[in-house]
Structures are given as C-alpha cells and as structure tokens.
Amino acid sequence: MKVLSTEGLTKLIDLIKSNFISSADTQATVAVDAVETSSVDTVETSVATLATVATTGAYSDLSGTPTVDQTYDGTSANAQSGVAVASAISGKANTDLSNISGTSTKCIDGQWVYGYLALASNVSANNTTPVTQYSLANYLPNDGYDYEVLMQALCSTGTTSGQFMSVVLRTDVYTGSIEICSTRTRTNASVDTRGNGILAVGTGRYVSVVPSSSNNYNGSYTLAVTAYRRIGTNT
C-alpha cells in the first residue's frame, strides 16, 4: 500500500476543495439566474397587460371618459340625471328681458320701470259722463303678461257747495272699482285733492275712469301713469 506524502495529501485536499467549491458556485449561480429570469418574465408579462395610461399617465390615454356636450341647445341633458338642461333652467328663472321695451331701462320681473304717461288733463265729468277708457297699449309691453301700474290722479270739484269729484279706476284684471282720489267742496269754491294707487292691468292694456251717478258728482280730473312692473308668469 502506497502512502501519500504530506505534500501529496495537501494537493489532494486542495483538489477536492477546488472541485467542490466550483461546483457549488456553479449550481448557486444557475439557481439565482433561474429565479431572476422567472421574476423578470413575470413582471414584464404583468406590465404588458397594463392599460397604456398606467405607463404614460396621460388623460388622453384613458378610455370610457364622460361625454361633455360642447354645443348646448334646447335638447342638451344633464349627463348624470338625464334631465333636460334647458327645461330645468327655464323652470327656475325667467331671464328673458325682452318683455321690457320702450325705455332705456331693462329689468327682470318684480322691479319697477319708471316712465310718465299723461292719460287725461283737466277732463270735465259729471253724473251723466260715461265710463271712459284710457289705453296703455303704447306704454306697457305687449307680451301677453299682466302688469302692475302706478297711477297718479288730481281731482277738482265744481264751485257749488256740496259738489264732489273722485277718480275711481278699473281694469280688465280688476273689474271692481278702486278709488284713488276724492274731494268735496263745502263752500262755493273749487277744491283740489291728489292721490295715487297701484292697479293690475291685463292683456287688454287699459285703465277706465268710472264716474258716480250722484247728482252732486261734478268737476274735473287729471290722470297719469308713472311706473309699471310685470306680474308673475300668467299661469
């Protein structure tokens, strides 16, 4: 039996160590490479299935974005509720200012438009005078809506004691009688009195002065309208 020398034994051990370590390193490297390759492939596959916007971040790469009506008209609808936008707006507010015309002032319902219009000046009246109608057609907008008008009046009695004069008005909306001015003389001299009132005027666009049937009704009156405003929507 041949016995290795110390030097030969050392070489043998070094050879074994060298072969073992080299093999282990190779196996470890192969294993790591396999894991890395598998992980990279998995990530690459996952990334490939993502939407384009996930990598670009651009809004233009989104799909299924909401549609915005860029050409608003009477058929446009709320994208969430489907309610017609035009109908909803018209049901909430009246923004059509075309109903106010003939003056430099434009306003929405409820605000007064001021403008003086003389209807009668020192018109004589007595118990035989018929109802006198005064047209407001050239004063109020002819838009089919009712209006309130602010009236001013001056009435003067005759010169005989006991005579009286009044300005009683009516319109096609209020067919009763509203007295806005009245006076009576207690001496043989004329007496003047002023008054004002607000009346509703309909599409007939007139105001009527209604005289008294009393024998003592005698004198004259002056009548003017000084302002108006639209009433509601006639519904």
Image (cartoon, rainbow, N blue to C red):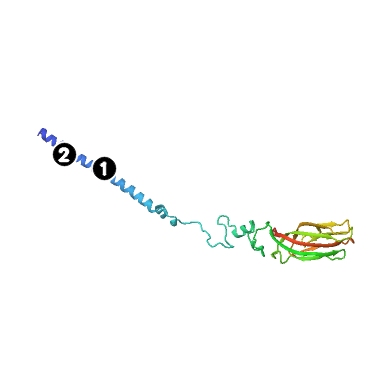
Depth check: give the residue in front, 123 or 213: 123
Image coordinates of residue 54 in percent, x first then y, are: 41, 52
Q: What residue would you read off at disc 2? A: 15
Q: What residue type is labelled 2?
A: Leu
- Tell me if residue 117 comes above or below residue 53 in the rendering: below
Q: Which amino acid does label 1 sit on?
A: Ala
Q: Residue at x 16, y 39 (%)?
A: 15
Residue 125 falls in image quadrant: bottom right
Quadrant of the drawing holding the N terminus: top left
- Tell me if residue 221 comes above or below residue 28 in the rendering: below
Image coordinates of residue 31 in percent, x first then y, are: 28, 44
Q: What element carries label 2?
A: helix
Image coordinates of residue 35 in percent, x first then y, are: 31, 45
Q: Is 61 displayed left or right of 69 in the figure? A: left
Residue 210 visible to the viewer? no
- Tell me if residue 175 comes above or below residue 5 in the rendering: below
Which circle's residue, 2 or 1, is located before the other in the chain? 2
Depth check: give the residue in front, 175 or 87: 175
Separation of residues labelled 2 and 1 (CA atoms): 20 Å
Q: Is mark 1 on a helix, strand or loop?
A: helix
Q: What residue would you read off at disc 1? A: 28
Question: Label 1 neighbourhood size at 10 Å, few (<14), some (14-19), many (20+)?
Answer: few
Quadrant of the drawing holding the C terminus: bottom right
Residue 18 visible to the viewer? yes
Depth check: give the residue in front, 180 or 21: 180
Q: Is 32 displayed left or right of 84 in the figure? A: left
Depth check: give the residue in front, 93 or 222: 222
Image coordinates of residue 113 in percent, x first then y, are: 68, 59
Q: Residue at x 78, y 64 (%)?
A: 121
Mark on residue 138? Answer: none
